[in-house]
Amino acid sequence: MSGSQTSHDNSHGSVKSYVTGLVLSIVLTIIPFGVVMSGDFSPLAMVGVITVTAVLQVLVQLVLFMHMSAKTDEGWNLTSFVFAVAILVLVIGGSLWIMHHLNLNMMIG
């Protein structure tokens, strides 16, 4: 079509980037599962490992699957990334805060 616009500047990823993202996602899922199932760590260490791997998982998803990078000239990628980080902080921080208060309030005695 003569009226269609194509952009070759935006990369839609390669098989290598998708496979890398898949492998990293699987590894970042297995690590906290293994930590929790082994039971060899303190609860604080478990929460720390789960939190760190969750943040890394979101970053892997954003960069490798959603193709967010700082290379594009448009401000939408940066805006989307800042919004995603803000939501991530609110959800993870709020969840940890709620779980902490539930733990305190559900204690018997």
Image (spheres, helix red, strand yellow):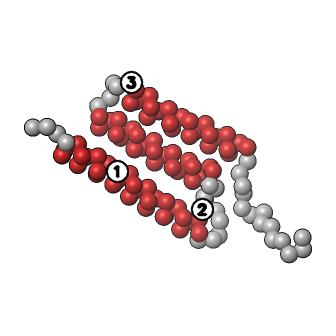
Question: Which of marks 3 and 2 precedes in the sequence?
Answer: 3
Judge left or right: residue 74 versus residue 48. Answer: right
Please tell me whether residue 8 is drawn above or below residue 64 in the rendered image.
below
18 and 103: which is toward the camera: 103
Q: Are marks 1 and 2 in contact (CB under 8 Å)?
A: no
Inspect the image, locate mark 3, and give the three-letter code of the amino acid beneath it.
Answer: Ser
Question: Which of marks 3 and 1 precedes in the sequence?
Answer: 3
- Tell me where residue 68 sits by quadrant: bottom right
Reading the image, the residue beneath label 1 is: 95
Marks 1 and 2 sit apart, C-alpha to C-alpha, by 29 Å
Q: Are marks 1 and 3 in contact (CB under 8 Å)?
A: no
User: Where residue 24 is drawn, which disc sits there?
Assistant: none
Inspect the image, locate mark 1, and give the three-letter code of the amino acid beneath it.
Answer: Ser
Reading the image, the residue beneath label 2 is: 70
Please tell me whether residue 109 is drawn above or below residue 78 in the rendered image.
above
As helix, strand or loop, the secondary structure at mark 2 comes to: loop
Viewer-nearest of labels 2 and 3? 3
Instruction: Give the crowd class for mark 1: few <14, some 14-19, many >=20 residues within 10 Å.
Output: few
Residue at the location (45% across, 45% down)?
A: 54
- Tell me where residue 90 sits by quadrant: bottom left
Instruction: Give the crowd class for mark 2: few <14, some 14-19, many >=20 residues within 10 Å.
Output: few
Reading the image, the residue beneath label 3 is: 38
